[in-house]
Amino acid sequence: MKYYNHLIILTIIFGLVACAFGVNAEYYYNNNEVEKLNNQVKDINQEIYSKKNKIKDEQNIQKKFASELQKKQFEKATLKNELALLDNRIKKTELDIEDLKIDINLTQLEIQKTESSIEEKNKDIHKAEDNLKTVLRSLYKEGDNNLLEILLLNENLSDFLSQVKYLEDVNSGIRKALQSLEINKSDLQVEKEVLAVKTEKLEDFKDSLDERLETLEAEKKNKEFVLEQTQNEESEYQKIIQIAKEEQKKAQQEILNLEYNVRQKLSSIEQNKIKFNDNGFIWPVPQNKITAYFHDSTYPYRHIFEHPAIDIRAKQSTILRSAASGYVAKAKNAGRGYSYIMIVHGDGLSTVYGHVSKIDVREDQYVTQGQRIGLTGGMPGTSGAGGFTTGPHLHFEIRLNGIPVNPLGYLP
C-alpha cells in the first residue's frame, strides 16, 4: 500500500512539474487576462505601424522643403528672396518639430510595449518560482524516496525499476524547469536593457524638441527683425546688406591687426613663464550639432560674407569657455551689434567667439583653458547678436597666423 502511495505522490509531483514549467503564459493567467494583454500589444503594434508610415510621409515633405531652401540660398540677395528663405526655414523647422513629436510618441509606445513584455515575463518568473517551490517542498516532505528505501518497499525488480523511472522523470522535469526559469530571467534582463536604451532615446528626442522649438522662435523673431529693420522696403534691405558687408570687412581687418599687435607685445615676455599651449583645443561650449560649417556653401548669408567659422548650436546664454590658454586680444561689446571675444594662443593660433551676449573678460587678460569668458547669444534683436544671425548659437573661429582655418581640424 505504501508503495502505491509513493507512486501516486510521484505521479502528482511529475504532473506539477510538467504543467508548471511549460513556460507558457496561458497556464499562468486566466483567459481574460491573456486576451487583454494580447489585445493591448496588438493595439500598440498597430499604432507603431501607423506612426512609422506618418514619419515616411513627413520625410518626403522634408526633402521637398530642403530642396527649395537650397535653391533660395543661391538666389540674388533681395528682400523678397530673404523673406522667402526665412519662410522656408520656418516651415522646415516646423516639420522638424512635427517629426520629433512623432518620434517621441513612437518611442513612448515602444516603451509601453516593452514594459508590458517585462510585466508578462515577471509574472511568468514568479509563477514558475512558486510552482518550483511547491514541487521541492513536496519532495522534501516525502523525503523517504531514496533508492535504498524504494528497493526495500518493492517486492520485485520490475516495480522497483518503474518507480526509479518516475524519480528520474521528476528530476528531469525539475532540471528543465530551472533551465526555463534561467532563460526567462535572462530574457527579462535583455528587455530591461532595451527599455533603458529606449528611455534614454526618448530623453534625447525631448532635448532635440526643446532645441528646435527655440530655433523656431529665433527664426520667427529673425523675420520680424528683418521686416522691422527694412520697413519692408527693398532699398532699406540693400542698405543693411551694404552696412553688414562693411562691418564684416572692418571686423576682419581689426582681427588681423589685433593678432599682429598682441603677438608683438607678447614677444617680449619670457615664454617659459607663461603657459600658452595646452594639449590641443577643447569645445568652447558643450559639443552639439553644427548648424553651419567652415566656408559652408549653404550658409544663409553667404551673399554678405564667406563663413570663416563653424556655428555650434547652443541655447541663449550658454556658458562660454576658452578653448585654450592665452591672452584676450579683444572683448568687443557692440550693444545689439556683433559682439565678440578674440584670444591669442601659442604656435600662431588664435580663436574668435562671436554673437556673445555677455563678456566676462577684459582685454590683455590671461585666461586658462576651460575658463569662463562669457555667455553665448545669437537670438535676433538681442545683445551681441548683430544684424544677421540664424538664431541662438556660437560662431567659433580658429585662425592660424591670422588666417581662418577649419576648427574641426583642431577640436577633439
Image: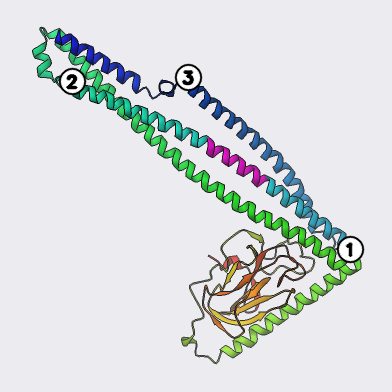
Say what secondary structure mark 2 lies in.
loop
Say what secondary structure mark 1 lies in.
loop
- Please say if 304 is above or below 157: below
Q: Residue 357: x, y in percent?
A: 67, 72
Question: Quick check: is 165 in the magenta stretch?
Answer: no
- Please say if 308 is above or below 135: below
Q: Mark 3 points at which residue?
A: 31
Identify which residue, 346 or 171, lies in the foreground: 171
Dot 3 amino acid type: Asn
Q: Specify start and end residues of the magenta stretch as a single range.
A: 99-112
Dot 2 amino acid type: Glu
Residue 162 shows in the view: no
Q: Mark 1 points at which residue?
A: 232
Q: Is residue 181 left or right of residue 82?
A: left
Mark 1 or 2, nearer chain start: 2
Q: In which quarter of the image is residue 185?
A: top left
Q: Residue 46: x, y in percent?
A: 61, 30
Q: In this view, does 191 lie to the left or right of 401?
A: left
| Residue under the point 80% across and 76% down | 246
